[in-house]
Image (tube, grey):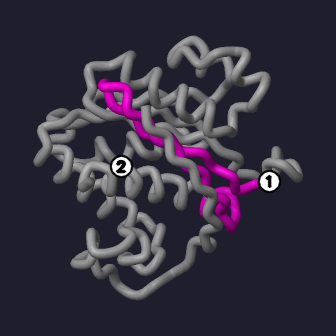
Amino acid sequence: MQISTQLKVAPSAKQSPPLNVKPFFQKGIIEAMNSRYDDEALAMLAAALAAELRAHGRRLITAESCTGGWISKLCTDLAGSSEWFERGLVTYSDQAKQELLGVRAADLYSHGAVSEVVAAAMARGAVEAGRADCAMSVSGIAGPSGGSPEKPVGMVCFGWAWPDGQLETESRLFAGDRDQIRRQSVAVAFEGLLLRLKE
């Protein structure tokens, strides 16, 4: 099992010039899109992921908390998504995470729902629960309340898992309001899987 961890601080969402998608895989995808998180940018990330999943013949399952199904919505906005999108789970409460994804109560108690331990468990539970070849998970604090000195508003944890046991996690600290934090979370979840599929 491989787990990589890193904490990055991301800028708040903002308006930017038109998208330039040519350097998608020459550098970070979000940077290539001029750090855009508007509807057009998120739809383009979803389309890029769809193309990559089709190319690999893989199917995706998602486990979302703070993004509330936004990732699944963008995936299923695309015609033909049934070819590569297996299912989406919105596990907003701790109880839902336990019941639908098998997250252990002890992990939730010890580490909190917003932690890489729980994001990893969510991704692992998702890929085990469905007939999919990869899974992504998101759990965070979108605000404006709910933050603490240890886990401020804008902290979001991500997980990506595969049926062979490979598992990777990452944490980010985003700036902005609730909508901006959620948009950035969606973008990073897409980017994370895209980059891993390219490895």
Amino acid tagged 2: Leu
- Residue furthest to the bottom in view is 17
**Mark 2 element type:** helix
Mark 2 vs mark 1, CA separation in Å: 25 Å
For residue 69, say whether it is visible: no
Compared with residue 192, is residue 118 higher up or lower down, i.e. above or below?
above
Image quadrant in which you'd find residue 177: bottom right
- Residue furthest to the front in view is 1
> In the shown orientation, is residue 192 left or right of residue 177?
left
- Residue furthest to the right in view is 149
- Residue 141 location in percent, x, y? 71, 47
Range drawn in magenta: 153-180
> In the shown orientation, is residue 89 left or right of residue 104?
left
Compared with residue 187, is residue 57 higher up or lower down, i.e. above or below?
above
Q: Nearer the viewer, residue 154 or 145?
A: 154
**Mark 1 element type:** loop
> In the shown orientation, is residue 160 left or right of residue 103?
left
Amino acid tagged 1: Pro
Residue occupying image coordinates x 70% and y 15%: 105
Residue occupying image coordinates x 49% and y 37%: 137
- Residue 11 location in percent, x, y? 61, 73
Quarter in which the N terminus is drawn: top left
Q: Which residue is mark 2?
A: 193
Which mark, residue 152? 1
Q: Pointer 2: residues within 10 angstroms few (<14), some, or many (20+)?
A: many
- Residue furthest to the top in view is 99
The reply to whether the C-beta atoms of the residues labelled 2 and 1 are less than 8 Å apart is: no
Quarter in which the C terminus is drawn: bottom left
- Residue 85 location in percent, x, y? 26, 35
